[in-house]
Amino acid sequence: MWLLLVSGWARRATFLWAAGPPLALAAVEYVAFRTSYLGSLLRDRLFGFAAGAFDLKDKNGVPVDAHFIPLSQLAPGRFLSSPSLWLGLVFAVACFAAAVRLRRDREPI
């Protein structure tokens, strides 16, 4: 949804406006605090959903093949009770509403 919002807002260099602020914030965080919490947050948002949605070990504790995860390994309770899921959905709804308003009115927010 962030990309949809930026594509309606930016007139030129859309990719730079979409990727620039998160990368700049991560760089400032690293320079100022020598931490990488924002990078970890973005990586988990893009690639870390499987660990929250599935039990990646079977009943004996043996890791399951990541390419074939059976439905018996699905853990919806843990996934749906995650605060990061709900905060991400709130952010997505806010970006979507702003993008719709921006594109409908053809004026800045």
Image (tube, rainbow, N blue to C red):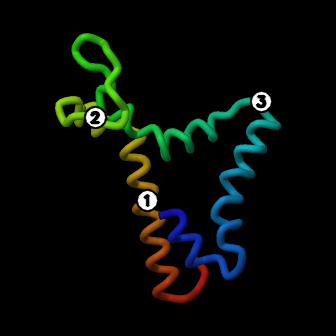
SS class, disc 1 = helix
- Image height of 98 relative to 55, above or below: below
> 49 left or right of 80?
right
Which residue is at a point 34% across and 29% down the rendered structure image?
65
Q: Earlier in the sequence, mark 1 or mark 2?
A: 2
The residue labelled by disc 1 is 92
Marks 1 and 2 in Cβ contact (< 8 Å)? no
Place of residue 44 in the rendered image (x, y in percent of width and height, measured from the top left) = 50, 39
**Mark 2: which amino acid?**
Ile
The residue labelled by disc 2 is 69
The residue labelled by disc 3 is 34
Q: Earlier in the sequence, mark 3 or mark 2?
A: 3
Place of residue 20 in the rendered image (x, y in percent of width and height, measured from the top left) = 71, 59
Query: Which of 63 and 21 lies nearest the eye of the viewer?
Result: 63
Q: How many marks?
A: 3
**Mark 3: which amino acid?**
Arg
Query: Whole-Å distance between the Cαs marked 1 and 2?
Result: 27 Å
Q: Which mark is residue 107?
A: none
Which residue is at a point 53% across and 70% down the rendered structure image?
5
> 23 left or right of 76?
right
Marks 3 and 2 in Cβ contact (< 8 Å)? no
Place of residue 3 in the rendered image (x, y in percent of width and height, measured from the top left) = 54, 66
> 27 left or right of 108?
right
